[in-house]
Each structure stands twice: as C-alpha cells, then as structure tokens.
Image (cartoon, grey):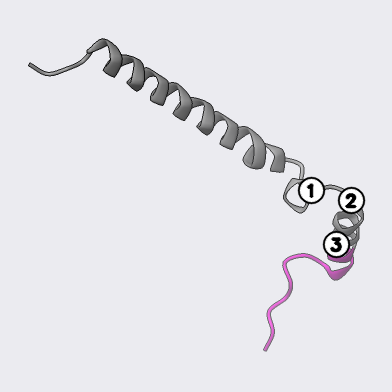
Amino acid sequence: MTEPPFVPRERLKKHQQYFQNIHKHTHLKGRYDKITSVVIPLAFAASTTFLIARGIYNMSQGIGKKE
C-alpha cells in the first residue's frame, strides 16, 4: 500500500522546471535563501570580528583582569 503524495505531480513538475531554468547559484534559488546563505553568515562574521577586536583591545590595555 502506497501513501498519497504531499504535492500533486503536476505542481511538483512545475516547480522543478521553474527551479531548473533559473540561472542563479543553486543555494540562492529560493525566495528566502539569501537570508540563510548571505545575511546570517555575514552577521556572524561581523559579530565575531567585533568580539575578537574588543578582546585584543582589552588585552592590550589590561582591562578586565582579575587581581
């Protein structure tokens, strides 16, 4: 016994052809893929860079040392 598909075959074929005809990178084809592929990594890199720079500054100035 097979279970019914989640999406009708015609609609699935339509979506497949749409995504196969887009001339973008594979990870940027969806509507919200730019958020997960570009914005989140850039925010992570920026916050990491800020925290590293702040740590280097604090070490060079001797700020935050325990006595």
Find out whether the residues at labels 1 and 2 contact each other: C-beta distance under 8 Å: yes
What residue sits right under mark 2 in the picture? 22
- Mark sitting on residue 29: 1
Q: Mark 1 or mark 2, which has the lower sequence index?
A: 2
Give 35 or 66, whichever is nearer the viewer: 66
- Locate residue 65, reporting x and y percent: 16, 17
State how far apart marks 1 and 2 are (Cα): 7 Å
Magenta-span inclusion, residue 53: no
Q: Which residues are magenta?
A: 1-13
- Left or right, 25 with respect to 60, comes to right
Q: Residue furthest bottom?
A: 1
Of residues 65 and 43, the one drawn nearer to the viewer in this rendering: 65
Q: Mark 2 against mark 3, which lies toward the viewer? A: 2
User: What residue type is disc 1 on?
Assistant: Lys
> In the depicted view, which residue is nearer to us: 34 or 25?
25
Please report the residue visible at 76 percent of the width from the left and 42 percent of the height from the top.
Answer: 31
